[in-house]
Amino acid sequence: MSINEADLTKNRANYAALTPVDFMRRSAEVYPDRLAVLHGGIRRSWSQTYRRASQLGHALRALGVGRGDVVTIMLANTPEMVESHVGVPVIGAVMNTLNTRLDAHSLTYMLDHAQPKVVLVDREFSRVMQEALLNARVRPIVIDIDDSEYDGAGELIGSQTYEALLAGAPDTPIIFEGDEWDAMSLNYTSGTTGEPKGVVYHHRGAYMNAVSNILEWDLPSHPVYLWTLPMFHCNGWCFPWTIAARAGVNVCLRRVSADGIFDAIANHGVTHYCGAPIVHSMLVNAADELKAQAMAKAAGRRVRGMVAGAAPSATLIEAMEALGITLTHVYGLTEVYGPCTICAPQAGWEDLPAPERAVYLARQGVRYHLQADADVVDPVTMQPVPRDGETIGEIVLRGNICMKGYLRNQEATDIAFAGGWFHTGDLGVRYPDGYIKIKDRSKDVIISGGENISSIEIEDVLYKHPAVFAVAVVAKPHPRWGETPCAFVELKPGVEVTVAELIKHCKEHLPGFKVPGAIEFGDLPKTSTGKIQKFELRKRSGAVSAIDV
């Protein structure tokens, strides 16, 4: 006898939408007095943090924010950012965290594209945000965050402060009443092929990735997590919700520095942190006395770092292990909520010498627990490439840990999801053991200090200079940042310009981290059809002298 599905209906007793905002509510109920947030002199428990997040939700409702409305957030890694990751999406609104390093022009585009009803802005970023808002068509309500740990310049530009907003709001719990497929956050790509694209996350995907973070790292109850990774980046790889699920401690770090990280390890008992390779290199290259004192206090406590953006080198792995920090290598993109594959360690790897172990650990690995699939396929036939570690194909992903799509860009969404996979644009191979490794980046993205930089964007700026005839930008290896933009410039006949003049021109049109770290003049290698051969320039980039920008 078959089961009659008509008699087995979904109802409130047997179904609830999957959403990561519930994790904080549970921690507040089960561990109300445990420390949740540590920031300078601020110490808040999970019950206090959840109360403030609830107040934020009620206050936003009172401002007219409802389901599907966007709240743009321009904050450092502060307690308000932790609270926003629950207070905004719990009422069905969409949180839009912005890169605090962007210039006003980029921010104006994102504001007009996102169309927020409310903007939360830290005083440190008020000047650039004010300029962006003046040039934008949208007119949101602006709320100021005046962080006590910030002692620099910056005006209050909003209608009221965050604390005043919360003070007048009730603190009763809010239960998410939407659908798990509802949009919960909006994150912008680096704009590698034109204007940045708005990546829309759903509650289900954020829930899945937050839980997968726990599974991949074997994250115990009550970890002490240091915020070196910006929470604006892919919603902190979903770790605001991961740490809430484990009732851990959010150690907020407004500015990333070796002193700040080692101080947190020594004095706050940090057990976990995430970051780009530059963060780990910063620790390795810190003063010996600083390292020794901090790690002596951490003796017997395992400190684990997660790295993404580039494969860890044998030298880095060995140096980090000597410090007492174990690295975990992950891979992902904005479109998949941050990391979605992991180089899961296998038995026996730990016994290998560091150089041999690095060969394995440099791979991008295997799919996250709750990601349905990851593969390397022929981009034409969409068939998996042989698992020989040599045949190159495109890395593709699918499952719950994939975006809803690109906001107001159906064409780009259709291209990204062609053939039932999300196309990463990264080229890689697959080994006999199933592990994936990137071999090249088809979009020519430069990853500098964990930030994605579009070569096309820099080229467009240089083309605006009257002396430039042709230009190509590629990545140049950099000992600190991993990569830095290297510009090869062909000048117009009879025209002269200096490197300093071009750098000045770039600084007038680009954020500082996108300004080329090296420029070389000369004829560019081209095909018979006039296409610039970037692969030839990549071979030459290492020999180009770096400049101080």
Image (spheres, rainbow, N blue to C red):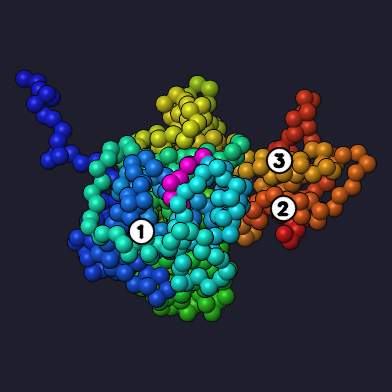
438 horizontally vs 24: left or right: right
Residue identifier under label 3 = 460
Residue 539, x across and y down, in percent: 72, 44
Q: Nearer the viewer, residue 343 or 451?
A: 451
**Image quarter of residue 182:** top left
Read off the magenta span. 113-119
Secondary structure found at label 3: helix
Whichever of labels 3 and 1 marks the residue nearer the N terminus, that label is: 1
- Name the element at disc 2: loop
The percent coordinates of residue 78 (x first, y second) are 43, 63
First-in-chain label (2 vs 1): 1
For badge 2, the amino acid type reads Glu
Q: Which amino acid type is marked by label 3?
A: Asp
Answer few, some or many: residues within 10 Å of disc 3's Cα (few below 14, many 20 plus, some between 14 and 19).
Answer: few
Residue 452 lies in magenta, yes or no? no
Judging by the rendered image, the residue that carries numbered circle 1 is 83
Answer yes or no: is residue 147 visible. yes
Query: Do labels 3 and 2 touch, CB within 8 Å?
Result: no
Residue situated in front as seen by the camera: 306 or 138: 138
Give how far apart the Cα atoms at labels 3 and 2 are: 13 Å
